[in-house]
Image (cartoon, rainbow, N blue to C red):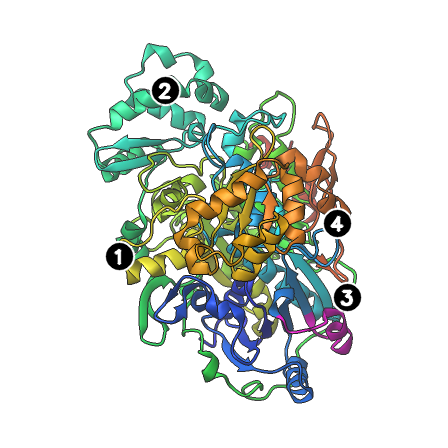
Amino acid sequence: MSDLPLSDVRVVDATDGLGESCGRFLADLGAQVVRVERPGGSRSRHAEPIEAGTSIPFALNNANKKVVVLDLGTDSGRARFDDLVAGADILVESSTGGTGLDPDELAAAHPALVVLTLSGFGRSGPYRNWNATESVIYAMSGVLSRSGEPGREPLLPPPGLVEQAVGVHAAWSALLAHFDRIRTGAGQLVEISAFESVVHGFDPGFGVQGSAAAGRRDDFPRDRPDAANFYPVLRCADGQVRICLLAKRQWRAMFAWLGEPDEFADPAFDTIPARFAAADRLHPLIEQLFADRTRDELVAEGAARGIPIGGVLRIGEVLDNDHFIAAGTLVDAEIGPEIHARIPSGYARIGGQRAGFRHRAPAADDALEPSWPGRRGPRGSSPGSAPGSHPFAGLRVLDLGVVVFGAELGRQFADHGADVIKVENREFPDGLRQSKRPNTLSPSVAWGHRNRRSLGLNLRTADGKDLFRRLATEADVVLANFKPGTLDAMGIGYDELRQVNPRIIVAEGSAFGSVGPWNTRLGYGPLVRAACGVSSLWRYSDDDPGLCDGSTVYPDHIGAQVSAVTVLAALIARGSHGHGTDIEIAQADAALVALGGQLARESLAPGSVRAEGNADPFAAPSGVYPCAGEDEWVVVSVRDDREWRGLTALIGRDDLADDPRFARWADRVENRAEADKVLASWLAERTPAEAMTLLQEAGVPAGAMLRLPDLLTDPHLVDRDAYTRLEHPMLPASLPTAVRVARFGSIPDAPLRPAPLPGADTHEIAVGILGLTDDEYSRLVADGVLQPA
């Protein structure tokens, strides 16, 4: 599709393994992505699971790309690579690729090139040479400590979620640097680590949090939370449903449905903490009400009553779901030679069209000559700004977004210099503005709304809508995440706004998108996870009724980041052709893309994909193991024979290196229980930090389970200045906060201007931008149209 936003962008992809999905996302958005592989193909072509000789992860992460094979250890191979890079806009490389590339040399040799180098832990710090796997990164990120049932081992999420977080943040960082090059004419070196991508970007402990955070203590107790109480999963006639009772009106509707029992009539139950405290009495009562109703009946009744309810679907049900097929989220495609599977197409709809799967990843022997198709002049830029300034300076964003998705999306632009105006109505406050304490600010608002201005505006009035349209005439982007059709119904949708501003970009997010039978469903991240199969795979086993994903708000943060990448791609395209577009992101699509491997496998072999718990079916020993101390854990994953030999040497059991039970990968998987015992007995005598360090030094991937306070003192994150402090006059104390995920050569870190109170900048915007007189302003305030703080 030549009308995709990045159709003029050329990317050289020299990644191998973690982060390959970065190039896939850029390719989905239209970029010409040429993957460079060594003779014999990259290691990731052999990543399990493999079906009919094709690696499923490789096939999904490298669709829509082209491939060249080059021996970079030869003069001729390196010369051909340099010629390819000379015609590119972006180079993405990973230290695991075995290419011998030097990012600093490449950036110096090609000053107009964006060079993004991606690794497990970054290029500096004590962990810089450590092995990174999805499970290791997840354990060390602080998220594992919030996953699983109390009294049991913490539980890893389904494979794919960590890879997705790394790939999406890498795509954002690459495009941000490319956007900056268009402004300044200068490329730069960008460094991104998988560790920090997940610490700060997956579901950050020191970042925007969901409404359920109101039910958690602030002092970070060592006991892991009972996630079942946050977004409970309840039995019904044909399976399970999840409910989200967050707003007071939702609880009141549930209370009425229960028949207004006296036990819960106290107004104290209007608050989340009170309901959490009574979960042992409240949830069985709701489950009894649901017992003789089906999932679909409960979802429909919940929608009628204004109660968010979602069915918990298993992976096979997701594949056959009418909504995902009608929406174009799932497509039937050839992912390898003669291998046809049902897979997620892609994240975004742009201009009404899906930007997703177009062709399968080429086989290594289908490699092309290392040259770009066609001819073009010098890479387009119109330098007008000096390197070192914020890339979005001069950009105006009208932000209608709410809760986690809205806060995270708007923050990406505010942190990099855009004038982000948060439009708020005091009658319908953003859910994040709920605070546990009177006269204080919610930490989530402080984290998520920093660097913005706030306009109090009642869009339910004709004058309010007119003022918004006037603002839109000089704006660049509008962001919203309401139920599909809401902006159109208000008269401020894309079709209306482009009449007054053809350059406007309108990005809307929702739970399930505007196309398909679920387009009007209520949705929060926990309900999206349940409907997409994430929850059913995030449990100890298929037979275990408990779901362990309750303490995360995934995919809110990732969905917002996906939307930010897509908006940035549209801004890059607008610089060439001058017109805007409409963008739609469904959080369900983001969740399904992450589960692409499981969906493909299940479609090829129905019934084969099950909840695996902590055991990696393709590595042994592997899992989450107890260490010395109370509730202390470490993740270890032995993937190949070399790592097994490193482990046996470390623990003083060289006799096991060639033991027939363990000598080969397949033997260890078959004798998993015995291999686990060997490792577990050694780990039981060591602390997580000690075990992790010794294993990593022996070449074995391992990661201690860090709790949230541990992140602030972790030696690697401290060495890399991963956190600073965020001040706000309405906070009782400063907050730890991140100012970056990636490290840019010339783009500065985000400023830390305090989040505004609702309507704090109403007069400034009304007079300074809209040009209202003081009399006009006073009248509109009196009429309730404008709402100053």
Residue 385 numbered tag: 3
* Mark 3 and mark 2: Cα distance apart in space: 59 Å
Query: Viewer-proximal residue, 600 or 665?
Result: 665
Mark 1 element type:
loop
Q: Which mark is residue 720?
A: 4
Q: Nearer the viewer, residue 524 or 631?
A: 631
Secondary structure beneath label 3: loop
Say which label, 1 or 3, has the lower sequence index.
Answer: 3
Q: Is residue 102 magenta?
A: yes
Q: Residue furthest left?
A: 292
Question: With 603 as the anchor, is 616 left or right in this view?
Answer: right
Q: Is residue 738 above or below residue 574?
A: above
**Badge 2 or badge 1: first in the primary sequence:** 2
Q: Where the C terminus falls, by quadrant?
A: top right
Instruction: Indicate which disc, 3 or 4, sits on the residue closer to the N terminus.
Output: 3
Q: Nearer the viewer, residue 350 or 276?
A: 276
- The residue shown at (63%, 78%) is 88
Name the residue at the top extreme: 262
Residue located at (43% from left, 65% from top):
60
Query: CA gap, disc 4 to disc 2?
Result: 46 Å
- Residue 68 versus residue 305 in the image, above or below: below
Q: Tell me whether circle 1 and circle 3 mark residues in contact (CB < 8 Å).
A: no
Q: Amino acid at mark 3?
A: Ser
Establish if 722 lies above or below 92: above
Q: SS of the residue at dot 2?
A: helix
Q: In the picture, residue 644 is in which quadrant?
A: bottom right
Q: Position of residue 411 (x, y in %)?
A: 62, 47
Segment tinted magenta in the rendering: 98-114
What residue sits right under mark 2 in the picture? 282
Q: Residue 708 vs residue 329: left or right?
A: right
Tell me if residue 32 is in the magenta stretch. Answer: no
